[in-house]
Image (spheres, rainbow, N blue to C red):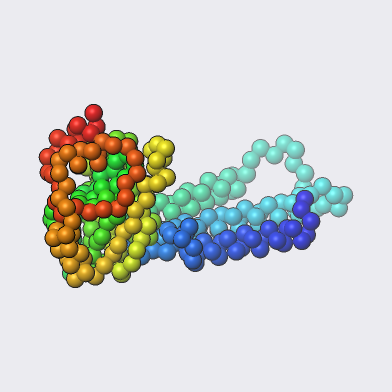
Amino acid sequence: MLPPKKRLASVLAMAAAVMLLATGCSSKYAVMSPAGPVAKSEYHLILWSFVVMIIVVIIVAVLFIYVLARFRDKSDNPAPYHPEWEGNRKLETIWTIVPIVLVAAIAIPTVVVTGELENPPKSKNAPITIDVISARWKWIFQYPQQGIETVNYVEIPANTPVNFQLTSVGPMNTFWVPQLGGMEFSMPGKDLKLWLEASHPGTYLGRSGQFSGKGFVHMQFNVYAKPTSQFDAWVQQVKTTDPALSEAASRKLLMTAGLAKPESFSSYPSDQQLFAQADN
């Protein structure tokens, strides 16, 4: 057993860690600093689950201390001794019902919130669509409505739902922007969907949330949320100042394994055969 001073230091360290986690004041705990409606809903689910688990810990700790004090072996212990005790219907009913109630307390809100987040709510701003392609070891973002493409960074208008359509060239990955919402898979030959929204302008870190090979740790990108007017100005700047992405360059970008610097293109080829060639 640890000395009293070390035990106190351990308790204080755990308390500090919990406080840091709860306040979300470190970039390591971005999930605890929601910046969008999806992330806020998931944040509340995390807090609710934490409360339920703390209740379980408190109950178990209290029962543990009670059993130690009530049934410890000593000469004047008044607790009856029942060596042939086979069961207690009342206790068995309690410890069967209580876990069911606790699981339901977590499962029901999770199912309800997940269903509510399946589609974006009505917004004063029309949603935009961004096609996301994960490749070896980079993220490619195509804007079909604007006709532009970016690599390893993405800009979105704030207070606007963004429909991400996810696919992959090569290994399966997981698209994740912790401060904006949960993660979704990107898989070859699939078109999976995820909507996110930034409640205010800012820069949010995104990354691959799943091990997919030696370069996955570098698959990070920034999400720049800007006011609608600044986003529209950025789109026009890309269309007028950045080069067009040729079919050959697009094929090389998809098929070449390696890191890529953030860049943007004023247009990109729409030939879907590039994906089939890259997968082969």
The spot of residue 269 in percent (x, y) is 13, 44
* Residue drawn at 33 percent across, 67 percent down: 202
Splitting the image into 4 quarters, where does residue 30 fall?
A: bottom left
- Residue furthest top as drawn: 280
Please tell me which residue lies in front, 203 or 116. 203
> x, y (%) of residue 247?
15, 40
The residue sitting at 77% across, 61% down in the picture is: 5
Against 205, is 131 above or below? above
Q: Quadrant of residue 251?
A: top left
Q: How many marks?
A: 0
The answer, for residue 47, to whether it is visible in the render is no
Q: Is residue 110 visible?
A: yes
Q: Is residue 96 left or right of residue 146?
A: right
Give coordinates of residue 220: x percent, y percent: 37, 51
At 85% across and 49% down in the image, what residue appears? 74
Of 38 and 145, which appears nearest the observer? 145
Residue at (19, 32) in percent of width and height: 276
In the rendered image, the vertical position of residue 97 relative to residue 277, given as above or below: below
Where the C terminus falls, by quadrant? Answer: top left
For this orientation, the residue located farthest to the right is 75
Residue 165, image x, y percentages:
22, 48
Hey, which quadrant is residue 275 in on the image? top left
